[in-house]
Image (cartoon, coloured by chain):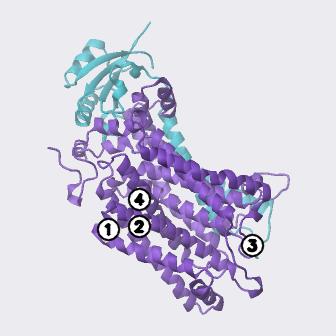
Chain colours: A purple, B cyan
Amino acid sequence: MATPVHSLHGDPVIGPNQTNATITAKISDIVLKDQPPLFWWCGLGLGIMLLGGLGIGVPMLFYWGVGIWGLNIPVGWGFAIINFVWWIGIGHAGTLISAILHLFRQEWRTSIARFSEAMTVFAVMCAGLFPLLHVGRPWLAFWLMPYPNTMNVWPQFRSPLVWDVFAVSTYATISILFWYMGLIPDLGAMRDRAPGKIQKLIYGVLSMGWRGSARHWERYEIAFLVLAGISTPLVVSVHTVVSFDFAVSVIPGWHATLFPPYFVAGAVYSGFAMVLTLAIPVRHFYKLHDFITIRHIDNMAKITLATGLVVFYGYMMEVFFAWYSGNPYEQYMMANRMSGPYAAQYWALLFCNGFIPQLLWFRKVRRNVIVLFVIAIIVNVGMWLERFVIVVTSLHRDFLPSSWDVYSPTIWDWAIYIGTIGQFLLLFFLFLRFVPMIAMFEMKLLTPKSEKTS
Amino acid sequence: MSTAYGLVAEFEDDHALLEAAEKTRDAGYKVIDAYSPFPIHGMGDAIGMKRPILAWVIFGMALVGMCVGFGLQYWVSVLNNPYNVGGKPMNSWPQFIPITFETTILAAGLTAVIGMLAFNGLPRPFHPLFEHPQFHRVNDDKFFLVIEAKDAQYESTHTRNFLEGLGPIEVVEVEGEE
């Protein structure tokens, strides 16, 4: 009888009766043979429905301009930046799972890597939309790129906002490449199993004619390792640069050396919450319990807890440094955050990100998927509130009381935000339908049989 | 007129395949290849493959990306359009590092994927091995060892007997040209 893999470390990472053939059959049949479950239709429908927010919001925005948003001076950033940071942070968990955990040889990452990477790509697509819409004249967004032009002006390379352009576009490119390269052997398997001619053609073209040659695998593994190796510093750099957008300015509450690590931890934290939000229903409705075991769920909850604690430390240090700096503007900013017009959001964020994750200390909570799903949703909300508090409370009352104002989002802010959630869901459900959602060839390395080699 | 592409032996699993590959290499065959649904540790050595130069190509292109990234910023900020920002020196190099880093990563990542495909001769829509009756399961659960007809030692019956001696499930000759 086959013994569970990695039984030394607790629960198995793959069901004991899985073989090479059953893995291919189970994962590729979801795409090629099985009828999509009702869950899929519901998710797709919800995605299309919410996408309407973009469908209406974006044309309105293009016609009227950013004046339809709740932005004012001094709060010039508002929802666009809040949502940008929120989405890009969510994306970071996918890279962490596929790159950093790969380098650390955390084999349990395998089954959740593929759809986490998909999540990364889609989240970055949602994130990228916001700066483009926020520039006001999106058809001139290419001015952000350095290209020789008749105006003889260049982007200001000393500005973190330009760093951001490079960081995010590099991140998007590398994420897509990493995801696609991981897919190539599986697309080959799909080509070989596809029942219809058109499916065969499409998967055949996308698989580049992959045929599992040992010479190809050698180079493939080098490329994979290099991509994992470069994605690791990349993911840290991206959110560091995002935090520089704030930290390099002199606004009270933003000008802090704490920001880069605090932002990176927050990104991973929110990203793992989103992976759990997606993984728990997908695992249930597609019956993937043999691939996404309770061990995966438990481990992800632990990472959420660990990064959540770093984030909570960040909140405490923000308060401490506001007081310790002796700077009246910093002190006022913190007092205003706690008791000003946005106090409710601040305390809600502490509840979501400070208190709720503490429940994850308990093994029972980490292994109860329903409770965990609710916690993951709360964390997603909490991280959104965090960005709201950081962006709005610092801007709306800065140095001169004569320039203070109150920010409140309009229906168009919400429409576009909800629209991107729809875009994300739609892309994710299309991914579930047309792409093998678990890396088949990597799972085969975990079967009890192939374990003997290593 | 059709010529033989090579002899294809199918094996039970990755261990049998690895062992067979090593024996084939030791018997003096040079143009051999193994096909499997997942990478097999040590298979590169077993088929007598040299260490790929891909890693060095990626490293070289990463350096190029680094130089282009920094060079672009230096040329723009110091030579082409010097512009005083907050009294900083024109060559305020620490502020050029983030973009330099990103272009380095971008060049390395693009080279890794494109280089992997290019050195592997992919995309390649058709291959003679696809005519093999079982080869459509190579990405599923089948393991094959191939001695190509190009090999100097290749001789249809002799090589077939050699492969039969390695304990395969079956040996099939595949036709077609590389």
Which quadrant of the rendered structure holds the C terminus of chain B? top left
Q: Are marks 2 and 4 on the same chain?
A: yes
Are labels 1 and 2 on one chain? yes
x, y (%) of residue B90? 75, 68
- Secondary structure state at the residue bearing disc 3: loop
Q: From the top left corner, tell me how far across and down residue A356 is, in percent.
A: 41, 74
Q: Chain of mark 3?
A: A
Image quadrant containing the N terminus of chain B:
top left
- Depth check, front residue: A88 or B52: A88
- Label 4 CA crowd tier, 10 Å (few <14, some 14–19, many 20+): many
Place of residue B34 in the rendered image (x, y in percent of width and height, measured from the top left): 33, 30
Q: CA distance from mark 3 to mark 4?
A: 36 Å
* In this view, B73 is above or below B131: below
In primary-sequence order, the first of circles 1 and 2 is 1
Pinpoint the chain carrying mark 2.
A
Q: Position of residue A288 (x, y in %)?
A: 33, 47
Image-quadrant location for residue B41: top left
> Mark 1 = which residue?
A365
- Residue at image mark 4: A276
- Asked if both marks, 3 and 4, belong to the same chain, the answer given is yes
Dots 1, 2 in contact, CB < 8 A: yes
Q: Is residue B92 left or right of residue B15?
A: right
Which one is earlier in the sequence, the residue at label 4 or at label 1?
4
Residue occupying the far left of the picture:
A1
Disc 3/disc 1 C-alpha distance (Å): 43 Å
Residue under circle 2?
A375
In contact (CB < 8 Å): disc 3 and disc 1: no
